[in-house]
Amino acid sequence: MKETVKNYSLFLVGLFIAAMGVALSTKAGLGTSPVASVPYSVSLVNKGLSFGWWLNLWSVVQICVQVALLKRKCKPAEILIQTILAFAYGYLTDFSCWLIRGLSAETYPVKLALMLLSCFVLGFGIWVQFKGGVAMLPGEAMNRAISQVTGRRYENVKIFFDVVYIIAAALICFIFLGKPEGVREGSLIAAVLIGSIIKLYNGLFSRLTQHRQYLKEERS
């Protein structure tokens, strides 16, 4: 029980970090992160719901894709947990946007720096969620399901779908707004970087673990 509470606490910390990464990307003004680009673009077109609520609805779509792929291998309890956490993520994203409402980036170098920071924050949030090991958000779980079904590496599947999200978001903006309001060069940077950043965190953690093990053996 204690271990379960610890793991869920770690996951929720990762969830909040990821939400802050998404919020930072919107503040950069160079296009939001790929994982949020479609709901963010829709929120710019239809302001009846908040960005967080469109994220919630997008999560429902990703859950449906996941269920269709895994079929009988799909665990109802895991889907329920994903749904609850996905809605929590939507609320946390709105909350994170509110927390940094006073933040502004006036010059392009500052905007670019903020966009790069958002990539590292979001990537770290996703990585921390993995380490929690209790659940995944629908978007990442969908990528995992596709990875399992196709045999492709998870990181590569994520990079591919990040690019697909960017293209879809760009089409939404051009069709309804006439300009790439929610999708710019920062979105493309994030599409390429975030999967690689997760690989970087995995590598750093692996090296740190090996170093700790080495020191432990030396002391013994």
Image (cartoon, rainbow, N blue to C red):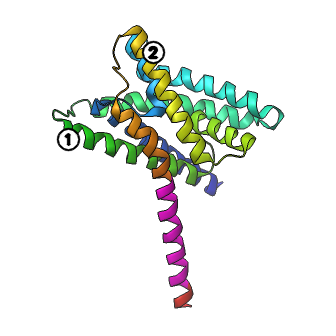
Which amino acid lies under the numbered mark 2 shown in the image of this protein? Ile
Residues in magenta, as a range: 199-216
User: At 53% across and 24% down in the image, what residue appears?
Assistant: 56
The correct choice, above or below, for 34 with respect to 57 in the image is below
Q: Which mark is residue 40?
A: none
> On the picture, is 165 further left or further right than 149?
left
User: At 38% across and 39% down in the image, what residue appears?
Assistant: 189
x and y, in percent, of residue 219 in the image: 52, 90
> On the picture, is 25 further left or further right than 175?
left
The residue that disc 1 covers is 109
Nearest the viewer among 191 and 217 is 191
The correct choice, above or below, for 47 with respect to 145 in the image is above
Classify residue 185 by image quadrant: top left
> Could you tell me if the residues under marks 2 and 1 are in contact, i.e. CB atoms within 8 Å?
no
Within the magenta stretch, is there residue 211? yes
x and y, in percent, of residue 33 in the image: 41, 34
x and y, in percent, of residue 104 in the image: 20, 32
Q: Could you tell me how many numbered marks the image carries?
A: 2
Which amino acid lies under the numbered mark 1 shown in the image of this protein? Pro
Q: CA distance from mark 2 to mark 1?
A: 27 Å
User: At 39% across and 33% down in the image, what residue appears?
Assistant: 187
Magenta: predominant secondary structure element?
helix
Nearest the viewer among 156 and 6 is 156
Nearest the viewer among 176 and 49 is 176
Residue 48 visible (yes or no)? no
Task: Give the structural element (helix, strand or loop) at label 2.
Answer: helix
The residue that disc 2 covers is 172
Looking at this view, name the residue that lies furthest to the right: 72
Residue 41 visible (yes or no)? yes
Task: Give the structural element (helix, strand or loop) at label 1.
Answer: helix
Residues packed near mark 2 inside 10 Å, few (<14), some (14 to 19) or many (20 plus): many
Nearest the viewer among 100 and 70 is 70
